[in-house]
């Protein structure tokens, strides 16, 4: 509707100016009868030919801008879809790694700390047009950024404790106290990672649904993205979420089978 309003606005002002100038010229001819009508008519045709050409060029430019904006929106969604898949995968690996590390620390074994970098790209939201999705993407980016900092701090904390113990700057009892605190912090971070993974999976389901809007293709403007979620959007999200969870479970199952083959081989 906004696009049609814009086009009609251009045409309205073009016709309005045409009407005003025409009336003015007719009125001028009556006041000054000696004016050369042929020259005036040629001038009118030239003026309005150029004027309407200018209007249609502007409309064409505006259509190109809208079409490009719509295309950039869907391109960004496809990139976000790939990024969210990577985030889910990295979170999965970090969660499993944390659980193994927790078992080792509870058994008072020393670790070689390692975690997977969680990717994120804030700029991918720049071309998005769905305001509701942009807000959710922004919230997830803040969560991921906070968690990445927590992972760095966690690693530094453990490495410091381990170094103090190895260099015998703290006794075994103090080491146990510090490790107990380290374990409690890791358990909290693991809870957050599981929650963020859940949120990321849900956002991925929404991304896939928004990409389906690409089917509403038009000749002039391409596909039109919605600026807000539809009323029944949450219901569709739940349906898409079920499909997505099954796909993730299949990937986990295959990954587990491959690991077991490697261990047994």
Image (cartoon, rainbow, N blue to C red):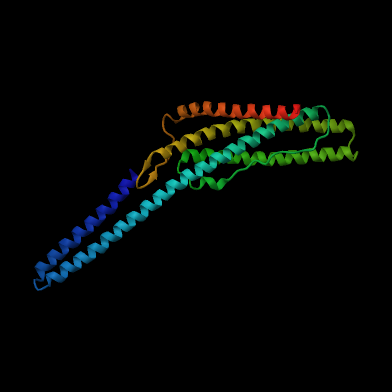
Q: Quadrant of the N terminus?
A: top left
Q: Which residue lies at the image location 48% right of the left edge and 47% below the top edge?
A: 127
Asked if residue 143 lies left or right of residue 66, the reply is: right
* Residue placed most toward the observer, 187 or 45: 45
Visible residue check, residue 71: yes
Q: Along the line of sight, which residue is nearer the eye, 109 or 222?
A: 222
Indicate the position of residue 3 as horizontal and vertical percent values.
34, 47
Which picture quadrant has residue 48?
Answer: bottom left
Left or right of 199? Residue 27 is left
Name the residue at 82% across, 27% down.
Answer: 107
Closer to us: 220 or 250: 250
The quarter of the rendered structure image containing the C terminus is top right
The reply to whether residue 128 is visible in this rendering is no
Residue 164 percent coordinates (x, y): 86, 40
User: Which of the 4 image quarters holds residue 37?
Assistant: bottom left
Residue 97: x, y in percent? 72, 33
Left or right: residue 170 versus residue 184 is right
Residue drawn at x 36%, y 53% is 62
The reply, left or right, for residue 19 in relation to residue 126 is: left
- The relative height of residue 3 versus residue 186 in the rendered view (above or below) is below
How many numbered marks are there?
0
Residue 105: percent from left, percent from top: 80, 30
**Identity of the residue drawn at 54% across and 32% down:** 202
Residue 229 appears in which quarter of the rendering? top left
């Amino acid at each position: 509707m906004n696009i049609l309003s814009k086009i009609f606005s251009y045409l309205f002002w073009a016709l309005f100016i045409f009407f005003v100038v025409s009336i003015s010229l007719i009125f001028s001819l009556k006041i000054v009868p000696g004016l050369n009508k042929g020259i005036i008519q040629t001038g009118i045709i030239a003026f309005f030919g150029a004027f309407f050409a200018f209007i249609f060029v502007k409309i064409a430019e505006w259509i190109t801008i809208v079409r490009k904006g719509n295309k950039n929106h869907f391109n960004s969604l496809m990139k976000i879809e790939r990024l969210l898949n990577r985030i889910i995968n990295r979170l999965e690996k970090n969660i499993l790694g944390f659980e193994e590390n927790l078992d080792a620390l509870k058994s008072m074994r020393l670790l070689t700390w390692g975690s997977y970098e969680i990717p994120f790209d804030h700029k991918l939201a720049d071309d998005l047009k769905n305001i509701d999705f942009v807000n959710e993407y922004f919230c997830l980016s803040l969560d991921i950024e906070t968690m990445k900092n927590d992972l760095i701090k966690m690693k530094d904390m453990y490495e410091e404790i381990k170094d103090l113990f190895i260099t015998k700057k703290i006794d075994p009892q103090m080491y146990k106290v510090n490790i107990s605190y380290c374990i409690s912090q890791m358990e909290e971070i693991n809870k957050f990672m599981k929650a963020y993974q859940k949120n990321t999976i849900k956002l991925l389901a929404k991304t896939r649904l928004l990409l389906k809007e690409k089917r509403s293709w038009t000749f002039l403007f391409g596909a039109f993205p919605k600026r807000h979620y539809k009323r029944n959007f949450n219901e569709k999200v739940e349906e898409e979420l079920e499909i997505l969870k099954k796909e993730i479970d299949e990937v986990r199952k295959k990954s587990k089978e491959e690991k077991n083959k490697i261990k047994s081989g």
